[in-house]
Amino acid sequence: MIVEISWSSLFLEKEKVVICQRCKSELSQITGHVCSRCGRMRHEHREEVMCGDCERWSLGNKTNHLDQNIACFEYNNFAKELMALYKYKGDYVLGAVFAAALQQKCMVKNKSIIIPLPISEERRYERGFNQTEGLLHLAGIPFETQLKREHTEKQSKKSRKERIEQEQFFFVENNTEISSREIVLVDDIYTTGATLHLAAKALKEAGAKSVSSITIFR
């Protein structure tokens, strides 16, 4: 019997042995009480529904263009190592580790358009792929790409203050496909949230009804 080979079939076969169970246990899943705005896990019991970062964002008179973020795992030291291998070393198949968690979160948003956070053409050439599109491909989740991004300095090289105060570098390619729609942005890591807020702002200015996000890590 001839079996048709495709990229997806190759990845699905490897998904079973991407990382061992011991390594997978190092991923800390976000459960229980979380910040209502950014999805960070709350380790202490407090009456407030927002974490300190989101409270400071609101006090700084920043507009909350992003309605809500849902995150899958905490960004611990193991997560940093894993994402460095996937994102910067090009170990693409590692993205399959997050497929089940991403599928589960996206099912909650089944009436929305899924849009991966874009990278610039220069950054795509440098890395060889868009890491967020890769996560969605490996999870078998359809997505659209109306949101585009201009080339800027790497976010990792900017301070927290610089990230929060940066100018808009996202734009929507086709407003008619965004107008009055519910959008879910997907990204790998939520740090300050500034990049996701800028993306949400561009989408809302293009007419989106709502913009929330799903990130692998928070």
Image (cartoon, grey):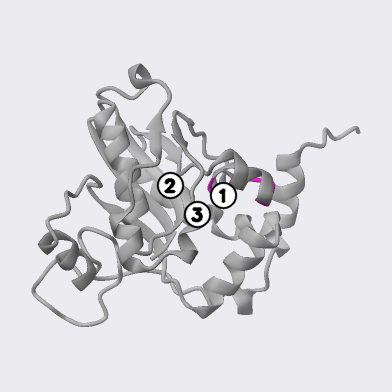
- Marks 2 and 1 sit apart, C-alpha to C-alpha, by 9 Å
Q: Is residue 198 above or below residue 98?
A: above
Q: Residue 153 bears which disc, if any?
A: 3
Q: Quadrant of residue 25?
A: bottom right
Amino acid type, callout 1:
Leu
Screen quadrant of the N terminus = top right
Q: Residue at x 29, y 45 (%)?
A: 212
- The one of 139 and 91 positioned closer to us in this rendering: 91
Magenta run includes residue 129:
yes
Mark 3 / mark 1, whichever is N-terminal? 1
At label 3, counting other C-alpha atoms closer than 10 Å, the crowd grade (few under 14, some 14-19, many 20 or more) is few
**Residue at 48 percent of width and 30 percent of height:** 144
The crowd level at tag 2 (other Cα within 10 Å; few <14, some 14-19, many 20+) is: many
Magenta-highlighted residues: 127-132
Disc on res. 135? 1
Query: 187 left or right of 46?
Result: right
Q: Residue at x 44, y 37 (%)?
A: 115
Which disc is residue 186 wearing? 2
Residue 151 relative to residue 190: left or right: right
